[in-house]
Structures are given as C-alpha cells and as structure tokens.
Image: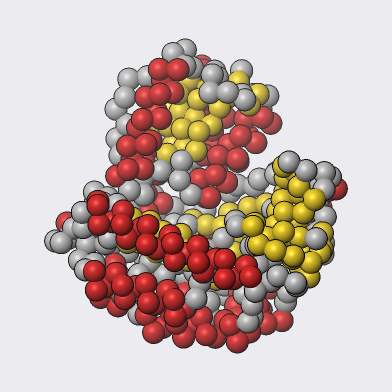
Amino acid sequence: MKFYIYTLGCKVNTYESNVMADALKNAGFQESESEYADIYIINTCTVTNTADHKSMKMIRHAIKQNENAIIVVTGCMSQTSEIEIEGVDIILGNKGKSKIVDYIKEYQQTKMKVVADKDLSNPLFEPMKLNNFSRTRAFVKIQDGCNNFCSYCIIPYSRGDVRSKKKEEVLDEIHSLVRNGHHEIVLTGIHTGNYGVDFEHYHFSDLLEDIIQIGGLKRLRISSIEMNELNDSVLKLMEKSDILVDHLHIPLQSGSDTILQSMNRKYLKHDFIRKIEEIRKIRPLISITTDVIVGFPGETEELFYETMETIKKINFSKIHVFPYSRRKGTKADTMDFQISDDVKKRRVKELLVLSKELEQSYFERFVGKELSFIPEVIKNGYMIGHTGNNLLVKKKGDCICDHDEISGKIVKVEYPYVIME
C-alpha cells in the first residue's frame, strides 16, 4: 500500500511527518510520489484561523481525490477542534504520531473510525527518532509544548505543557545522524530554548555542551530561541565553541513596548536590544534574524513606525514578517481596535522592503571574505547551500560530494544569493 503525507505549519510538524513516514516505510508501506495514495495523512496546523481553513480545505481535497483511501487527520487543528467530516477514518491530535502504523492497522482490521486519546493535561515527551540520512542538515526535535501564553497564540492549548526529550535519546539520535554523514544538526521544538525546565539538574546549555563534544559534528544550529533563554551559560558556549553557528533566530514580534505588553511577551524593547549587544560582543559578525507580527490589535501608525525604528537600531540580517491573523480561543481575538487587512498588507510590504535592505547590507559585509558552506542541491550548474551564518551560497559545480564543506571567497551579491569563487 502507498501513503502520502501533506504537512502544514512549522518545522516541528515537518519533523513529525518525517517520523511518521519512516515508521510507515519500516512497516512495509511505500511513499507515493503523487497525492493519489491508499493512505492519505494530513498533518494540520492551527496557529491562525487561516491555518485552520487551509487544513480543512486539504482534508476535503484529500477525501475527494482519494475516495477509497484511508484518510488520517493529525496535528494541531485536530488537537483543538472536532473533525466532523464524512470520510475521515483516523483522527489523532498531537499524541500518538509515532504509533501511526498501529492506528492504521487497527482501522484495517475493524473498518471502524479511530479517534485517539488527545488528553494533554499531563503529557510526556513522545519518543521520536528520525533516520534522515540525506547528509545535509538534519532536524532533531528536542522539546514540545509551551507555557508562555502569548495573547495571540493557541499553541499552548494545541501542544500542551513544556516537556523535554531525554538527553540520552537526543545524543543517541545525533550520534546516529553524524555517523551517517550529517555535518549540521538543527535543534528544533515548539519552545526550543525552554528545553530542560522539566528536569532537575539538566538545562538547555548542558545539552548544547554535550552535543558539541560529539566527534564529527561540524555545525550545531538552533532553529529559534527566545531572547530571555540566551542566558550567560549559552553565551559562554557561543564564546568558546565555533561548532555553534554564527546565526540565531530570535523572535522580536514587535518593537513597541505597548504592543509587547499587549502580546504578553516576557520582555521589553530595551531588554531585547541589550541582549543583542551582549551577543555581538561575543560574535561581531553574527547573523540575527527575527519574526515580527504587524497589525496587532491597537497597533497605531506611530507604534508601527516605532517597531520599524527598533528593527533598524537592532540591525537584523533578515525579518520574517507576518500580518496578525485572528485566532479564536486567544485573548487577542477579543481585543478592541482590530486593524484592517488593507493596513496590514501595506505595513507588511514596508517591512519586507526594509528586510531586503538589511539582508543585502549584511551580505555585502562578506564580499571578499573566505567562507565555507555545505552544498545541499545542484541547480543549473551551481552548488547551492548555506554558510554557518545562513548566507545562501551559489558556487559553480555539479557534484555535492557527500555534502562536505566547501570553502571559497565571496565575490559578489546576487540577491538572494552570494556568489562564491
């Protein structure tokens, strides 16, 4: 039997989809190259109302395209919402994805709709290990859940409390990936830097220190981390080890204290700026990227331009811009002074222009410098991949040679690439 997995949402969902694919292939199922399959799995997202609509649209599309297929719905939307669509055969939330084969076999035997337990009131970390031997960067999920309760976010309800993967399991997974040719590991989670808060004497910095001791690992990247989780212990590791790459993604969300407080973020503007200054004392050329939400309820023109000025002052190397999208069940959905779509679209465009200016300016700093990158793909006679500080590199060549690091001089910028000689 053939299966197909459609994934919406974040890198954690992507990781979990890959884990499900591995489990199915190990059980003798084949992965379909097209949407026509005997088993169709939709791994949903619910971060916004729009994400819900996209997830529902894909579920209906899958049922229509595959009338005789086993339809499985899992992920964040099915965790927080009732799925009452004729034709859905198996419903999971964010528990039990690693047991996907068992649920499918149960349905095959009984032909009865399967609705798995979705209780996240006292969750444990669900063991998952990904055998991803493509030899480029490998993602390792180390953490799940979030207790921050930002006013715009449904994720604490769809993912449950913070829980961490046992250090032995994390290290074993990374050892396996490195032995099989991976040079770069990316740590990911719902709230990655909160790893270890459920352990007594083992924290995120301890895990980082253990990982960088693994022989053969050349790069360790953190997919995203909150400003207040970059504590002294983490910064000391960045100072002493160049295995931790010259790139951090630190969500800002707003450059206005008024909006940050309304969002229930756990810092103010000056705290964020001071932390960036500390990081740059250790790593002067580091790439710092961020997320910004525009059009949050109550964001006046004055407050929006305050955010613009904050971004310029921090001098990010790239901004991921998101228009605020209402989500039922969150505090922000009930707030007054909602912003019109037209205003949000205009502000998004302005921020994207600024982001491109900042990104090109950061690129230009490396023209004439020697850097290294790990080739990921070959396209039109060029090897393409990322440097440690997240520059997207093109270099002439037609062999990625086990994805070993390649060094060279950056000779010019051809946005969104830098060209290596």
From the viewer's side, name the closer residue of 228 and 372: 372
- Is residue 262 shown left or right of residue 187? left
**Numbered label tally:** 0
The colour scheme is secondary structure
- Is residue 251 shown left or right of residue 170? left
Residue 118 sits in quarter? top left
Q: Which part of the image, by quadrant, shows the C terminus? A: bottom right
From the viewer's side, name the closer residue of 151 and 245: 245
Q: Residue at x 60, y 20 (%)?
A: 2
Do we see residue 249 in this rendering? no
Q: Residue at x 56, y 60 (%)?
A: 223
From the viewer's side, name the closer residue of 46 and 296: 296
Location of residue 291 in the rendering, given as x and y in whole percent from the top left corner: 44, 63
Do we see residue 409 in this rendering? yes
Question: Which residue in the rendered view is the most extreme toward the top?
Answer: 68
**52 versus 260 height, above or below:** above
Location of residue 348 in the rendering, given as x and y in whole percent from the top left corner: 36, 58
**336 versus 267 height, above or below:** above
Q: Residue at x 53, y 31 (%)?
A: 5
Residue 86 sits in quarter? top left
- Is residue 310 shown left or right of residue 220? left
Q: Residue at x 41, y 51 (%)?
A: 159
Location of residue 139 in the rendering, given as x and y in whole percent from the top left corner: 63, 52
Question: Which residue in the rendered view is the most extreme toward the left?
Answer: 336
Q: Which part of the image, by quadrant, shows the N terminus? A: top right
- Is residue 139 shown left or right of residue 61? right
**86 versus 77 height, above or below:** above
